[in-house]
Image (cartoon, rainbow, N blue to C red):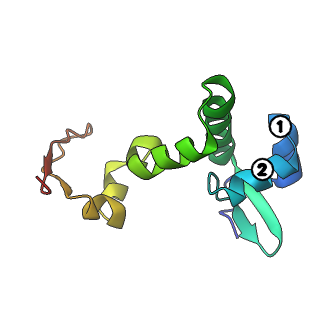
Amino acid sequence: MADKTKQIFTIGTTARMLEISTETLIGYERDGLINPMRQGKWRYFTKNDIKWIQCVREMIHVHGISIKAVKKLLRLTLCWNISECPFEKRQSCTAFLASGQTPLHASGNHQVLHFHNNAA
């Protein structure tokens, strides 16, 4: 299951934290907006999942973006621009490598990233 050092929450607890119904969370999952951890029939959410759900809800309810439009935005947005993805993880990420972007160098404790788009 999940890393024991991470806090995880059941769907009921997550729904209460977000003040929404469990059916809403199931609907977001069915629509492909969220992908909770699963163990059998149980769904588990991390704090990052909860932050993402808050972001999705803001796009839908505050900015008036449809679920269909949110899904399209997600297809067009690079995942490392959404999540906090460290340089070391990107070096072995198939999505990053397949994008045609390659890091030229990183220096010292601060990573200085320069990208060359090989697709151009």
The one nearer the camera, 62 or 107, is 62
Q: Which of these two is toward me, 92 or 11?
A: 11
Counting residues from the start of the chain, the first of labels 1 and 2 encountered is 1
Q: Is residue 50 above or below residue 6?
A: above
Residue 7 showing in the rendered view: no
For residue 110, above or below residue 99: above
| Amino acid type of the residue that numbered disc 2 sits on in the rendered structure | Leu
Q: Which mark is residue 25?
A: 2
Relative image position of residue 86 (x, y in whole percent): 38, 48
Q: What kind of element bears circle 1?
A: helix
**Residue drawn 20% across the image and 58% down it:** 100
Residue 113 visible in the snapshot: yes
Give the camera-side residue of 120 and 87: 120
Q: Helix or strand or loop: what does disc 2 sit on?
A: helix
Q: How many marks?
A: 2
Residue at the location (67% across, 41% down)? 53
